[in-house]
Amino acid sequence: MDWQQLLALTPVLLVASISVMLMLVIAFVRDHLLTCVITCLGLGGAAICSLVSVGEMAQQVTPLLIIDDFSRLFGALVLLICLISAWMTYPYLQATDEIREEYYILLALAALGALVLIASNHFASMFIGLELVSVSLFAMVGYLAHSRDQVKLTLEAGVKYMVLSGVSSSFLLFGVALVYAYSGSLTMDVFSQPANAVLAPQYLILGTAMIAIGIAFKMSWVPFHMWTPDVYQGAPAPVTGFLAGGVKIAVFALLMRWLMPIQGPYLGILANGLMAMAALSMLLGNLLALRQDNLKRLLAYSSIAHMGYAAITLIAAINIGNLSPTLAAEAAGMYLLTYATVTLLAFTVLSHLAAQDLTYETGQLQHYQGLLWRQPIAALGLLIAMLALAGMPLTAGFIGKYYVFMAAVDQQLWLLLWLLIIGSAMGLYYYLRVILILCKDTQQAATNSYRGLNPLIILLALLTLWLGIYPSPSIAWVQLALAGF
Amino acid sequence: MQLLGILISLLAGGLLALLCDRYASAAASRWVSLASLLLATLLWLPLWPQATANASVWLVHTDAIWMQRFGIHILLATDAIGSILIGLTLLLGYIALLSAWGEIKHRVGLFYLNLLFTLAGVIGVFSAMDLFLFFVFWEVMLVPMFLIISIWGHENRRYAALKFFIYTQASSLLMLAAMLTLVLLHYQQTGLLTFSWFELTQTQTDGTVGWWLMLGFYVAFLVKLPGIPVHNWLPDAHTQAPTPGSILLAGILLKTGAYGLLRFVFPLFPEAAAGFAPVAITLGVISVLYAAKLAFAQTDLKRLIAYTSISHMGFVSLGIFAWNSISLQGTMMQMIAHGLSSAALFAIAGLLQQRLHSRDLQQMGGLWQLAPKLSAFTMLFSLAALGLPGLGNFVGEFVVLLGSFQAYPWATAVAALGMILAPVYALLILQKGFFGPPSELVKAGVADLSARELLMLGILAAGLVILGFWPNLILDLSTTPIQHLLASGG
């Protein structure tokens, strides 16, 4: 490994050093603000490191990691998401009497895992990345198990996430083993490898399918979605935000890197499987969200549906359309960017509310009644997030949906397009229901002067609107990230 | 730039009204809204003489790049059709403002914000000539109206607001899919990625693809119009909305559907639309008759008026799909006249609700004795709704029937029966509510019109009379653009 490669790896090394440094700092001083600031500075610094090296040559660092513009830009995105997540967590943890500082070590480790995941083009590094993220998340999901009223829910969520990760990892590992048996290599572009004379191609197909299933668990595509609502509900609001807006982005970015450039036989089978999962996710996710009275569960089902929409772009990317081959990839990138922004906005509002009053943490919609009159900023943020998730124009959500429509039309995926339309129409019902509850009249007076996360809410709400009103810079950003594909 | 100026003045006025309510007084926010409407009107006024004097079709043309990647522009342009409808929007804006002046008592600033944003959205719809921009306005105008219904509406407001939003948005997703397919089709044919109406009307859209795309647009506009069988949202939304909301819904939001049919369905898909016309006309005729019959069965005054709207918009469907210059001129006339008369009837229903706290016709009766001015106005507008010669609606319906008789004599003959059903429901309002001895509810005392209310109804009445006696004001203006539409729409 020469200096060039080491330099390319700086963001990863920096993020890795945060967790070590935090451990040392905590050994000497326990100070919540200090730990949080160190985490944020480290993550922000790593993001800046990634960004300044955009445009430099792609570096293969060891066979495991590739640092190209895709890794740099999506890495920076995920780092920023982690930074926002740390910011979101601070007032939330401050309001509990739990030991707070160690949380940030876990967050830094998860960020490291996400970075590795995005930069991996080798099954070993993919596995390392996924495990780093998952193992940190078990602890994060169950972090407040002792200090909250809903001990059972939190523990249930933690255990469920652990079991899920175990199952998904075992699928993944077995799949990797089968692929290795077929191709004798652990690099990701197995499809372009010469056919193996010894083993039948069924091994490759089966192996790929099992890897896809392992990842589908993480993406909570139906029928591998069962864990999602329970974990979303039981986990602390900032952790749920990170799970929905951070982890899914990283895993999806990995899928993009794995699936989008590949060509070869047997892709049809993979596309059909993805298509079935996308269709089911769109339908079931939206259907199950309809009658939810719990905002966190509602957002869980909504995220299942949204991941179904996102899957359309992957399917579209597998065959080449007439507009340009990069449209589908661009759609995927834009969808991730916009979805992450909107989801983070929604969960920032939830964290903000939960930090001042733990009754909000249950997520029961009745607590949100008349929020618009009691806490206008938080409610307005949630309102914008709901409109964006419903795909209203002038919000980020519409740009994402527009791209998915465009990709589907370009590839003539009419069946998926119909399901997308039906799903979005169903989605309107429950997003609007939340807005209606926010606008309901209330007896409670607007006496609350808690500021907490207001700056972050305003920032993310403006970002959501800006992405919707003037998306050109972000389109250019995504195109830059995909230029190397 | 004028159109952009109108939009900006309304949007800025809305925000300012909200701030005024928060930091000054509710009255201040009312005056600010009025001022921003006045400013918008001042910007619009120069379009009027231009439209009469200028032979060139497109009056203003603002073009700026919005999203380079997909060739999306901020392309605002309007011809006489658009500017007449913008004028109607502004006029009804004043009426809604006047009606809100007395009715809306809480969260005043927020209400005016939503009111002005709705107006801006509708004006955007009438002037956007880039399909993407059109779609943005089309959807965005729903949000403030949704909030108006759900925050200030009547007892069942949340249900109505939800239904209104879901119907419109779900159907507009079909339009989005059709629109993107059209754009990619155009790209395949010419290699140019654009959303501009002027370019896309050149696309070859024959064959099955054209049919599907046309249907996508048609359904979205039919929901908004509304026409049977997708009219179901309207009675609820109109009944539950506060009076200014009902005025805007009936007066101008419905017209966006008609405008869409006129501007997009025929010019973009001439062959498919012409082939589809018999079906659309049949649906239109069914709307006219069936909604009139339903209106007759209502006891809720606002619901009754809502059904008459569906019936009247059936004529618009008929006129547009007959697609000749006379029927289209009649359609324009019908749109304006119905905008005024339905707004007036909803305003009256609002006044009655304020006084009686009821919309139930069964409980009313004998209002004429206690509130003669109010009753006289009701009589005038009911007569307008039933198509009395001398008032705008008569001209509209008559010219529509005249125009479509050439093309579809049988359907027109059946639709003309609607002219018989209209008096039945229109006179029913008068008979039940205004004649006879005063009912218990009315005896408790009903105030007659105040000066503000007199002004509001007076403007609308004057408008209808002017349209009835000098219909050429509208008919002449719309001649040139209609010829152009006919030329582009095959």
Image: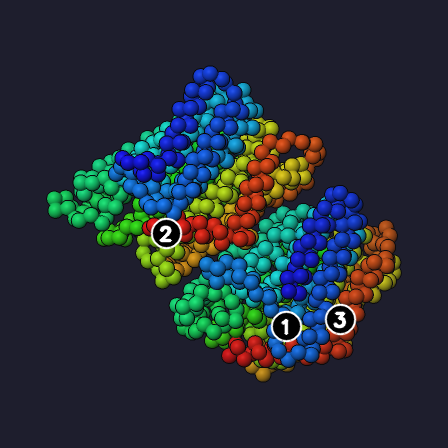
- Helix, strand, or loop for circle 3? helix
Which numbered tag is attached to residue B464? 3
Q: Locate residue B84, reporting x and y percent.
A: 67, 70
Q: Residues within 10 Å of mark 1 (few under 14, many from 20)?
A: some
Same subunit, labels 2 and 1: the answer reads no
Q: Give the residue type at disc 3.
A: Leu
Label 2 marks a residue whose chain is A
Is A271 on the left-hand or right-hand side of A250? left
Instruction: Write down the chain letter for disc 3.
Output: B
Observer-nearest of B46 and B304: B46
Name the chain under label 1: B
Query: Which tag is nearer the camera, tag 2 or tag 1?
Result: 2
| Residue at figure coordinates x 69%, y 64% from the top left | B89
Name the residue type under label 1.
Answer: Leu
Looking at this view, name the residue that lies furthest to the bottom: B406
Marker disc for residue A483: 2
Mark 2 lies on a secondary structure that is loop
Q: Which residue is mark 1?
A: B59
Describe the colour scheme in one phrase.
Answer: rainbow
Give the quarter of the image for residue B467. Answer: bottom right
* Disc 1 and disc 3 on one polypeptide chain: yes
Which quarter shows the N terminus of chain B?
bottom right
Q: Residue at x 45, y 72 (%)?
A: B203
Above or below, comparing residue A31 to residue B436 in the picture? above
Q: Nearer the viewer, mark 2 or mark 3?
A: 2
CA gap, disc 1 and disc 3: 26 Å
- Residue A6 shows in the view: yes
Q: Identify the element where label 1 is drawn.
A: loop
